[in-house]
Amino acid sequence: MDKNNMNETLNVLETRRSVRGFDPERMPSDELIEQVVRAGEYAPTGRGMQSPRIVVVTNKAVRDKLSQLNAEVMGVESDPFYGAPVIILVLADRSRPTYIYDGSLVMGNLMNAAHAVGLGSCWIHRAHEVFDSVEGKLLLASWGIEGDYEGIGHVALGYALKEPAEAKPRKDDYTIWVK
């Protein structure tokens, strides 16, 4: 990797922020979504086993159903996806000992790639609870997903309504260097 690409990669990693306000009317192109998903597919996984599954939801009715289920778990009536028109669900196979780590790395790659292509994203929790529910399991079955999968997280994806705030300074004791 040349120095310019490395600097660009580091810039993406340092400037990505969680977006908590999306333009619900502005749907990213399939091409942009595919670029983001491809980055998720290339996340490291334990022993290269690729235990996660990625589900891209652009269907508004399904997206709204996921929002409702997530809000019920959270105990709120507002949209926990902040108006994002795209929801990317990451599941991982519980039979793999590294499944939570594998799925978490996919989530990170998805969010960093979103920023790299000009989209906003936010990790939304409660996928575990949603997809352990009867209704969640029925959704998985309707999508042809069989097996013992756990919801790792949802990525709310779309165009930000406003620029995210600057990063807070990193804490002084974030890294301990033992030489």
Image (cartoon, rainbow, N blue to C red):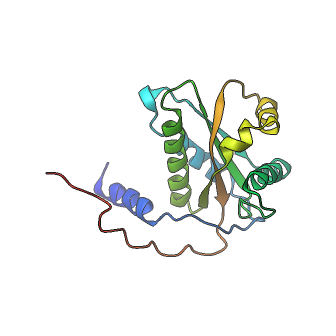
| Residue drawn at the location 49% of the way across and 27% of the way down | 97
The quarter of the picture where residue 158 lies is bottom right
Count of picture labels: 0
| Towards the viewer: 30 or 159 | 159
The quarter of the picture where residue 128 lies is top right
In the rendered view, tell whether residue 115 sits above or below residue 141: below
| Towards the viewer: 18 or 171 | 171
Residue occupying the far left of the picture: 179
Residue occupying the far front of the picture: 75
In the rendered view, tell whether residue 131 sits above or below residue 12: above
Side (left or right) of 123 relative to 8: right
Side (left or right) of 16 relative to 156: left
| Residue drawn at the location 73% of the way across and 43% of the way down | 130
- Image coords of residue 38 (percent x, y): 56, 42
- Image coords of residue 110 (percent x, y): 55, 49
- Image coords of residue 122 (percent x, y): 60, 59
| Residue drawn at the location 48% of the way across and 39% of the way down | 101
In the rendered view, tell whether residue 71 sits above or below residue 138: below
Residue occupying the far right of the picture: 61
- Image coords of residue 157 (percent x, y): 65, 57
In the rendered view, tell whether residue 111 sits above or below residue 171: above
| Residue drawn at the location 50% of the way across and 58% of the way down | 116
